[in-house]
Image (tube, helix red, strand yellow):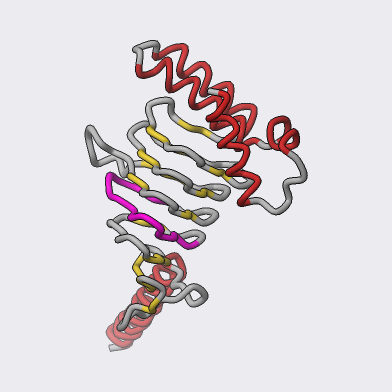
Amino acid sequence: MFDRLKEEIASIKARDPAVKSSLEVVLLYPSFRAVRDYRMAHWFYVRGHYFIARWISQNSRHATGIEIHPGAKIGKGLFIDHGAGVVIGETTEIGDNCTLYQNVTLGGTGKDVGKRHPTLGNNVMVGAGARVLGPMKIGDNSKIAANAVVLDEVPPNCTAVGVPARVVRKDGVRVLNSDLDHIHIPDPVSEIMCKHLMYIEKLEKQIKELKAEIDELKKG
């Protein structure tokens, strides 16, 4: 256990240049506490002590803002930077040395049973605000851009962006015929609003034409 804690501290120090000391990580970093509490809760969970496991995880959530279900399977070296709003579902599996930023959700779609949550390979990075939903896999060394919504599998060594997310880079090379990039990401809300506005304009035009025809009939 002591060796595992030392690994967790070293992992955070290696990936966060703001860290000044190991003591700072132990006492002040919500990521360290959340992962430490998760490992304790998971120990109880796999032995069938579900209430104690959830009690530990819920207390950790209130203290850190990070919600990790005790049933999740997490490898070594997980770093949750900032951490606020992170949610990790019950059947999530996370490999070694992964990084999650604030407001990340590793959740379900509500349509699956059994394995409902994603599997992350080793060295995966998930950007702030991203949603990875469903029992798909994110391959080793892949990156999910901020605010992306991932609904399909992402192969290893790829970068996925957008809503829904699409692969734009593989092995460091831009994917041909991709109309997405890190900056020009389509806004699905704006697209839907534009469609609705066009439809409203069409209806207003039809209403005006009908009113004109009615007025003509009244005059006749």
| Relative side of 34 to 49, left or right | right
Where does the image place residue 112, in percent across and percent down from the top left? 23, 39
Q: Residue at x 29, y 85 (%)?
A: 213
Q: Residue at x 37, y 80 (%)?
A: 179
**In the rendered image of this protein, does residue 34 appear above or below residue 219?**
above
In the image, 145 versus 1, the foreground residue is 1
**In the rendered image of this protein, does residue 65 appear above or below residue 81?**
above
Check residue 139 for magenta coloring: yes
Residue 108 occupies which quadrant of the picture?
A: top left
In the image, 100 versus 217, the foreground residue is 100
Where does the image place residue 123, in percent across and percent down from the top left? 44, 52
| Farthest right residue in view | 20
Check residue 80 for magenta coloring: no
Quadrant of the image for the C terminus? bottom left
| Relative side of 15 to 173, left or right | right
Where does the image place residue 87, in percent across and percent down from the top left? 48, 39
In the image, 205 versus 128, the foreground residue is 128
**In the rendered image of this protein, does residue 56 appear above or below residue 12?**
above
Span colored in magenta: 131-145
**In the rendered image of this protein, does residue 5 appear above or below residue 202?**
above
| Farthest left residue in view | 113
Q: Residue at x 47, y 54 (%)?
A: 126
